[in-house]
């Protein structure tokens, strides 16, 4: 059984678009409007997607249901497993008392809540995003902030806003690798273009982040620190994306930003220390005296689990290591690619009843193309496994016995149980929209904007991440559509490079409103049941920041097209 997607099943593009949006309307309506718990919203949204795919788009029921289970399985191994392992590492740090030392080490740097927000949510969160991605920074940094004394709601919401500018290079550059693969464009050009859009937002986001917590006056009181945080991060992000590679952009930027800020704060502190209203007002000297101080060795030991996490994730991301482990441990089949060469590494399992059965067609692709549904059961080389082994290794070094670690892991699973259901169903929903063509219908609606496409094309990426919770998945869904539309419109030289990069750059601003990220944030900060309030808080921040990206893209398209990389003006 094969089936070809239909992009205007109801005969009127606006009506087909409205119907294609029903799963999102149900999901967000229940979440934000009726305040239903997130995992139930995700189940309802996924169910709606399956029904719409079958009844409105004419997708065979077996294909619709199979695509949901395929997406769910993908989500469990590729995303949920990372979050579980990262939170497990955090729980080990808490259990052994090392997390308390970490908190005190940050409090000793500055007692000001605004500066702690920048250090933890932005700098440290960016480093975790670059290492693990897929929601791990929101979980770890959110829990960290609660430990420092932030309110759970603030910790969840502010970390969602902070986890934006780094997302395009999350998990060792996975989104950029995916974008280059699906568009067949130069990865160096795409990487450079993204690195000419997002560093501008990296300067804006730290200011935006502090302003979301305090007043304008209180924001400008720490403006020098905001400039150091955002400026050092943006400069490193731009340099690494334009002159190095796409793997370590966030890790390098996060480290440089953190070190630069730490050095700066040794010489500068705000005149007024800002604390929450229910906290006692203190001077910088009083705050330093109230903090318990630890030796350099104790602080290094406390941060050691996260150093181990970084090493494991970096090693797991090395192609040679990954390929060697895959060949030894991952079930595989021999697959011959279109160019006649055998696909390197494990080819994976063809998902039953779905692989090669659904065809995309014009105008989404240039010619009818079968959608692959191949599941790589890379249980050992999955990023989540690297995180999990890092947690076990850290636990052993910190003196935990196997039984105790098993007990901690059990508590982690119980705490994340609703988030696991929500994330799994969200990925299932995203895959149903992909294989039914609903995502393409929504994306095509934006392509009708003509010369404004550089602005609205940003929201295609934004929509993709809001749907799937992943910039990687958004690039896989809409990268080809952006390329085709850009080549048809041809508004400026190398417009396809600009718009494909825009898909990834705009997508990062949708990260804070996807149900998956919100569920991770609420689970890590013990805010389960408060997802609707968090969504309402971050929604307009998400839209406004995406609009800023759209304006930046418009400037590149019509004012500074000479800065769009084309292979000729890219400096290696």
Image: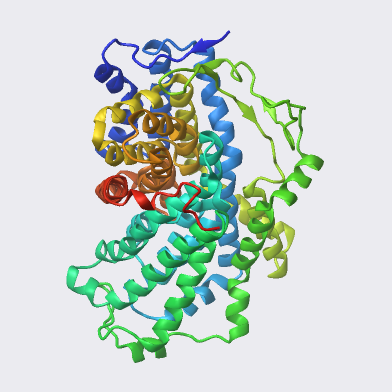
Quadrant hosting residue 519: top left
Q: Is residue 167 visible?
A: no
**Residue 232 percent across, percent down from the top left:** 42, 71
Q: Is residue 456 visible?
A: yes
Give the number of marks: 0
- In this orientation, which residue lies closer to the viewer: 39 or 384? 384
> Is residue 396 left or right of 116 when viewed as pictured?
right
The image quadrant where one finds the C terminus is bottom right
Question: What kind of colouring is applied to the model shown?
Answer: rainbow
Up/down of 267 relative to 53, above or below = below
Residue at point 26%, 61% (across, down): 212
- In this orientation, which residue lies closer to the viewer: 433 or 68? 433
**Residue 259 percent across, percent down from the top left:** 49, 76
The image quadrant where one finds the N terminus is top right
Residue at point 57%, 79% (across, down): 299
From this viewpoint, which residue is outermost toward the right?
328
**Residue 458 percent across, percent down from the top left:** 33, 41
């Amino acid at each position: 059984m094969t089936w070809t997607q239909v992009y205007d099943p109801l005969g009127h593009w606006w009506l087909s678009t409205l119907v294609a949006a029903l799963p999102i309307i149900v999901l967000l309506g229940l979440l934000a409007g009726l305040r239903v718990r997130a995992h139930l919203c995700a189940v309802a949204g996924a169910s709606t997607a399956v029904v719409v795919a079958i009844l409105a788009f004419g997708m065979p029921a077996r294909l619709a249901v199979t695509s949901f289970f395929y997406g769910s399985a993908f989500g469990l191994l590729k995303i949920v497993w990372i979050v579980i392992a990262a939170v497990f590492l955090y729980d080990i740090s808490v259990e052994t008392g090392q997390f308390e030392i970490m908190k005190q080490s940050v409090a000793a740097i500055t007692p000001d809540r605004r500066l702690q927000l920048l250090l933890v949510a932005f700098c440290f969160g960016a480093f975790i995003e670059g290492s693990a991605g897929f929601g791990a920074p929101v979980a770890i940094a959110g829990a960290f902030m609660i430990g420092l004394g932030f309110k759970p709601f603030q910790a969840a919401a502010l970390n969602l806003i902070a986890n934006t500018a780094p997302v395009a290079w999350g998990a060792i550059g996975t989104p950029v690798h995916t974008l280059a693969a699906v568009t067949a464009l130069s990865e160096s050009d795409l990487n450079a273009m993204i690195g000419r859009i997002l560093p501008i937002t990296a300067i804006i986001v730290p200011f935006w982040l502090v302003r979301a917590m305090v007043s304008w006056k209180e924001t400008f009181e720490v403006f020098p620190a905001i400039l150091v945080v955002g400026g050092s991060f943006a400069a490193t992000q731009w340099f690494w994306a334009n002159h190095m590679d796409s793997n370590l952009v966030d890790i390098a930027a996060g480290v440089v930003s953190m070190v630069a800020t730490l050095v700066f704060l040794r010489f500068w502190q705000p005149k007024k220390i800002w604390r929450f209203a229910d906290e006692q007002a203190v001077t910088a000297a009083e705050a330093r005296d109230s903090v318990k101080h630890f030796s350099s060795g104790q602080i290094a030991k406390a941060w050691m689990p996260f150093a181990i996490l970084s090493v494991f994730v970096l090693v797991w991301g090395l192609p040679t290591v990954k390929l060697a482990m895959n060949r030894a441990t991952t079930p595989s089949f021999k697959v011959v690619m279109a160019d006649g060469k055998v696909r390197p590494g494990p080819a994976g399992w063809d998902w039953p009843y779905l692989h090669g059965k659904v065809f995309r067609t014009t105008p989404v692709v240039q010619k009818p193309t079968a959608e692959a549904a191949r599941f790589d059961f890379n249980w050992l080389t999955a990023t989540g496994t690297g995180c999990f082994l890092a947690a076990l290794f850290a636990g052993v070094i910190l003196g935990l016995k196997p039984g105790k670690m098993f007990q901690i892991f059990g508590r982690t699973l119980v705490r994340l149980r609703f988030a696991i259901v929500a994330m799994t169903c969200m990925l299932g929903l995203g895959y149903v929209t992909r294989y039914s063509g609903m995502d393409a219908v929504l994306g095509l609606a934006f392509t009708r904007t003509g010369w404004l496409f550089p602005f609205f094309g940003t929201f295609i990426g934004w929509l993709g991440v809001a749907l799937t919770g992943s910039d990687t998945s958004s690039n896989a869904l809409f990268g080809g559509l952006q390329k085709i539309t850009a080549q048809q419109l041809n508004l400026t030289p190398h417009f396809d490079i600009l718009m494909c990069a825009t898909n990834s750059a705009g997508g990062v601003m949708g990260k804070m409103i996807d149900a998956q990220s919100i569920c991770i944030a609420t689970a890590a900060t013990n805010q389960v049941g408060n997802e609707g309030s968090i969504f309402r808080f971050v929604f307009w921040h998400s839209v406004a920041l995406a609009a800023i990206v759209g304006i930046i893209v418009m400037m590149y398209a019509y004012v500074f097209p000479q800065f769009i990389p084309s292979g000729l003006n890219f400096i290696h």
